[in-house]
Image (cartoon, rainbow, N blue to C red):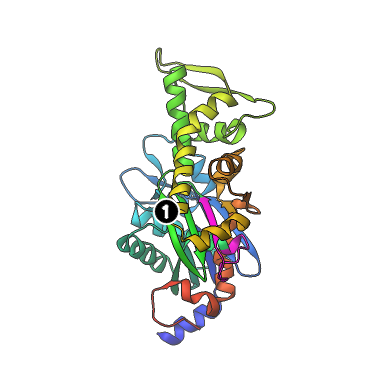
Amino acid sequence: MKAFEWMVGKFSTDMGIDLGTANTLVCIPNEGVVLNEPSVVAVRKGTNDVLLDGDAVGLQAKEMLGKTPGNIQAIRPLKNGVIADFEITEKMLRYFIRKVHNRSFMVRPRIVIAIPSGITAVERRAVINSAERAGARKVYLVSEPMAAGIGAGMPVADPLASMVVDIGGGTTEVAVMSLFGIVHSESIRIAGDEMDEAIVNYMRRNYNLLVGDQTAERIKMMIGSAVPLEEELEMEVAGRDMMIGLPRRTIVTSSEIREALLEPVMAIVQAIKATLENTPPELAADLVQQGITMCGGGALLRGIDRVVEQEVQLPVRIGSDPMTCVARGTGEFLNQLDIYSRVLEETNDDIAA
């Protein structure tokens, strides 16, 4: 059996996975990010049977969100950064692993998975079990802030403070790191999804217009901002009128969406402040020069770096290609597994050859 595992492993491509609430990214060492798809699966309602022999996963499934007939259901199996549906997550991971291997069945790769720093031991075990059942030969877990720091090129191995703010779909991870360790971290379940929800609530409250989560996400991406813009934007939005129940269009402005996003943005700022308040003085002094690096899809919200900079009075920069920082970090872990293994949570005591 071990010989078979070894042989299959030799023909498998090891991969790093950013298993996100909104999107799953796969990084291959020396190749970069090779897959970036929504964490969505379409199933037959009342069952866990994936449609179309597994093809209704990722982008195809996201297009079905809110638009499925009664017998089909589009599911996001992760909620707030953790697995909400074990079986569907397993099937989604199996699909992504096979897709990277050109749909080959006989693959047993080693996998590094980034997880939120605040999840429980039970939730970590659920991630490991899902990956193993999906075909992983061995699973390593690494905290998202550490992966983001590595992916953003921060000096996390040095006796120097590195601070990262990773705003994902389900969680925002804030951490100060030094010497391959997390000195202090805050993990809050306020991130991109809550921003979308805030927009949905604003449209319902101020326009009596019911819009879906995908529409809210488009509004956020097209005209959302955290600070006043030099030239304010506007957008036509369609939804269902809550008074008469018929479709209706209206125009919303970036200033209105900024108002809608104020609460989640300030919650993220408070998490950053809480982390800084718990940072030892010597490391806090380093941050005056080092500043804060922001990653994740939420870092793309216009002006959010300026809000953070203004609130905490430290230099703030957006990481290069912020959406892929965590995934690139997992790939770097695989590249230098012997060095980085000290910050990995392993499923076995030894590192697989």
Q: Is residue 254 left or right of residue 89?
A: right
Query: In the rendered image, which residue does mark 1 sit on?
Result: 186
Name the residue located 61 percent from the left edge and 70 percent from the top edge.
29
Q: Residue 338 appears at what percent x and percent y?
A: 53, 80
10 Å neighbourhood of mark 1: few (<14), some, or many (≥20)?
A: many
- SS for dot 1: strand
Q: Quadrant of residue 70?
A: top left
Name the residue located 52 percent from the left edge and 58 percent from the top edge.
284
Residue 17 shows up from this direction: no
Q: Nearer the viewer, residue 43 or 165?
A: 165
Q: Is residue 164 left or right of residue 80?
A: right
Q: Nearer the viewer, residue 76 or 189?
A: 189
At label 1, the amino acid type is Glu
Name the residue located 54 percent from the left edge and 28 percent from the top edge.
257
Q: Is residue 212 above or below residue 205?
A: below
Q: Residue 158 appears at what percent x and percent y?
A: 58, 71
Which residues, given as a range, are shown in magenta?
Answer: 150-166
